[in-house]
Amino acid sequence: MSTDPSRVERPVAPELAVSEWLNAEQPITLAALRGKVVLIHAFQMLCPGCVMHGVPQTQRIHQGVRDADFVVLGLHTVFEHHEAMKPVSLRAFVHEFRLEFPIGIDAYDGQAPLPRTMAAYAMRGTPTTILIDRRGRIAASAFGALDDIALGVTIGQLLAEQA
């Protein structure tokens, strides 16, 4: 995962299109998180790479990076096997894996080829990790498994930046 050294070139992060939030008392918006560094982990509960690497990594980051200016969000973005990955199944998954970070269910109308947030961010699949800087711009986006140290360095660099 690499960040663009030129903050001016970073694109504005589209708002999340979420139909329901788990582990959150109220809906979460990126606009409300402006001023914080945000990690979004897009996953599917039946994706082997997500279950074996991405979700555990995201939980470790959520538990390990204790900074008031850092937020971890999950995004369950289902683009296949829709019948098997309904919200009731996701709730059981979140409970069984003891996930603590807020998880949004990507809005999907059943007609478009992809869920709305997945399409807005032009994600290639899951797992996808997106980092948003304090100004609400996409600082990094990566598809697939990420190295813990490289991801940690990128998070640290973004936290060191001023808004």
Image (cartoon, rainbow, N blue to C red):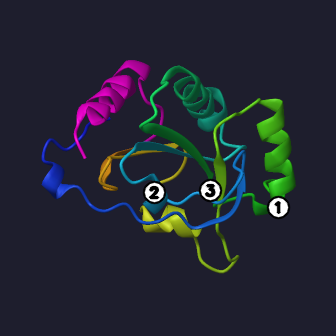
Where does the N terminus fall, quadrant-wise? Answer: top left
The structure residue drawn at horizontal position 32% and vertical position 47%, both measured from the top left corner, is 134
Q: Quadrant of residue 96?
A: top right
Q: Main secondary structure of the magenta part?
A: helix
SS of the residue at dot 1? helix
Q: Is residue 29 left or right of residue 6?
A: right
**Residue 2 location, x and y as percent?**
26, 36
Q: Which residues are magenta?
A: 143-163
Q: Quadrant of residue 123?
A: bottom left
Q: Amino acid at mark 2?
A: Met
Mark 1 Cα shell of 10 Å, populated few (<14), some (14-19), many (≥20): few
Q: Is residue 149 above or below residue 123?
A: above
Distance between the Cα atoms at labels 1 and 2? 21 Å
SS of the residue at dot 3? loop
**Residue 113 location, x and y as percent?**
58, 73
**Residue 79 location, x and y as percent?**
63, 61
The structure residue drawn at horizontal position 14% and vertical position 55%, both measured from the top left corner, is 8
Distance between the Cα atoms at labels 3 and 2? 10 Å
N-terminal-most mark, 3 or 2: 3
**Marks 3 and 2: CB-CB under 8 Å?**
yes
Q: Is residue 162 magenta?
A: yes
Q: Nearer the viewer, residue 88 or 83?
A: 88
Q: Quadrant of residue 162?
A: top left
Distance between the Cα atoms at labels 3 and 1? 13 Å
Q: Is residue 32 left or right of residue 82?
A: left
Residue 77: assigned label = 3
Residue at far bottom of view: 111
**Residue 9 location, x and y as percent?**
16, 56
Query: Badge 1 is on which residue?
Result: 83
The structure residue drawn at horizontal position 53% and vertical position 39%, both measured from the top left corner, is 72
